[in-house]
Amino acid sequence: MEPEVALAPPVVALVVVHDPGVWFDESVAALAAQDYPNLRLVFLVTG
């Protein structure tokens, strides 16, 4: 594990979406661009 990851508390971004709209791709890109070292992204698309 990298030192900065070991020092950063874990953060999970849980995004639940039903029938994603035009904003979905932009939102995913914005979350993926975050530079927090211990970030996990979870997407649940229900429709």
Image (cartoon, rainbow, N blue to C red):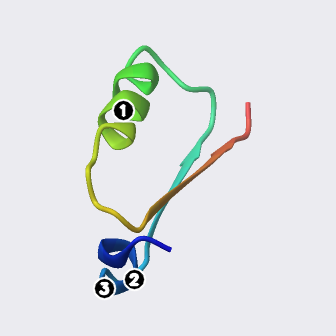
Q: What residue did someone put label 3 on?
A: 7
Q: Nearer the viewer, residue 34 or 16?
A: 34
Mark drawn on residue 12: none
Q: Which residue sits at x=63%, y=37%?
A: 18
C-alpha separation, residue under disc 1 versus residue under disc 3: 27 Å
Indicate which disc, 2 or 1, sits on the residue closer to the N terminus.
Answer: 2
Q: Which residue sits at x=42%, y=14%?
A: 22
Of tags 1 and 3, the one toward the viewer is: 3
Q: Amino acid at mark 1?
A: Ser
Residue located farthest toward the right when viewing the structure as drawn: 47
Q: Nearer the viewer, residue 27 or 20?
A: 27
Q: Percent position (x, y) of residue 37?
A: 34, 63
Q: Amino acid at mark 3?
A: Leu
Q: Quadrant of residue 3?
A: bottom left
Secondary structure under badge 2?
Answer: helix
Secondary structure under badge 3?
Answer: helix
Q: What residue did someone put label 2 on?
A: 6
Q: Percent position (x, y) of residue 30?
A: 30, 34
Mark drawn on residue 27: 1
